[in-house]
Amino acid sequence: MRRYGKHTDEDDVRVRPNRKGNRPRTNIRPKHEDASEGFVLTVDRGRLHVLIDDRTIVAMKARELGRKSAVVGDRVAVVGDLSGDKDTLARIVRVEERSSVLRRTADDDDPYERVVVANADQLAIVTALADPEPRPRLIDRCLVAAFDAGLEPLLVLTKSDLASAEKLMESYGALGIDYVVTSREELAAGEAAQRVREKLEGRITAFVGHSGVGKTTLVNALVERQRATGHVNAVTGRGRHTTTSALALPLPDGTGWVIDTPGVRSFGLNHVDPSRVIHAFPDLEPGTEGCPRACSHDEQDCALDQWVADGHADPQRLYSLRRLLATRERREGD
């Protein structure tokens, strides 16, 4: 190793070259103004399948995005190889502002939010009327998540040939939620898919539901595509997870999108701010002006009781609101 004395000649000192060039470091990032706009269809092990015009390309998140991730339904800016050819890989350099975000947590004590889909405007909650039995608490939780995210809920009740929908809908009539009832025979004949498809036109609809309720079977009928389907365990009454990742699929007429999501057995609401749920009840919201600060809307001094007593809203609406808000304190199986 060469050593230099106290007095060295500048010309004799070796300087390690900068392999990255002589440009000074900067925090200014490129704007990628020439990037193409894409729509995220699915995410698979860190690779994102993105629709650009009429072709699907595979992309990865650029390092400059940091911890920000893209999910199904996101509109993104993409650069690089956009040919869609095999073994090509593009880069997602920007995630555009989202119009809505549907989130869930593993349970009510989990602080980590999981984004289910972005930019949807409708949430289709699929539940079987039998085999497996309906789970009203899970439906309530999905409704709370929809109201919190600003999505319009749609109840899709399957297997009506095994049980009537009348009893279940008694609990949700006061909410004024749109719903559609289907049977297995109608689904096989294509009649059910057509009725449901009418509710989806011009919208981006995320489908959620407990495993085994027939969600993916319905999605297959809606988009005329086959994803793996499962069955209900005769002993436990539970379905088997067959959809392992969310996938956005276009309706055949091109007027809307269906996002099939993995079956859920729980829907945590740790991320939900109860004060936002009241926005889904326009007949009750004005009555909260007299509520005490941070009112839970289910306490002795809540102004909504007087609001209803004065005839401004149906008592069943207040009952429904309080039932939904209380669902965070109840487990789905209760």
Image: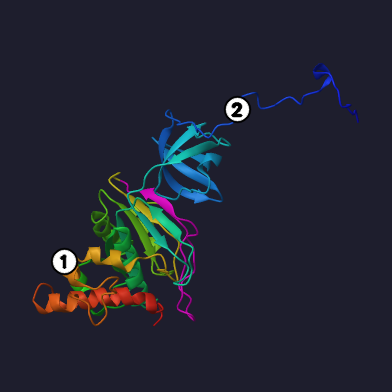
| Farthest-out residue, front | 7
* Quadrant location of the N terminus in the rendered image: top right
Residue type at mark 2 is Pro
Magenta stretch: residue 156 in it? no
Q: Residue at x 51, y 40 (%)?
A: 58
Q: Nearer the viewer, mark 2 or mark 1?
A: 2
Q: Residue at x 38, y 63 (%)?
A: 208
Q: In this orientation, does residue 165 appear? A: no
Q: Quadrant of residue 271?
A: bottom left
Q: What residue is pinned by disc 2?
A: 24
Q: Position of residue 322 (x, y in %)?
A: 26, 76
Q: Looking at the image, tell me whether mark 2 or mark 1 is earlier in sequence order.
A: 2
Looking at the image, residue 267 lies above or below residue 91:
below
What span is colored magenta in the figure? 226-252
Kind of residue at disc 1:
Pro
The answer to which image quadrant residue 196 occupies is bottom left
Residue 97 in percent (x, y) is at 37, 45
Q: How is the image coloured?
A: rainbow
Q: Residue at x 43, y 47 (%)?
A: 41
Please state which of residues 159 and 282 is positioned toward the viewer in this rendering: 282
- 248 with respect to 121 (left or right): right
Above or below 143: residue 53? above
Q: Main secondary structure of the magenta part?
A: loop
The residue to which callout 1 is attached is: 286
226 w.r.t. 29: above or below? below
Q: Is residue 196 left or right of residue 60?
A: left
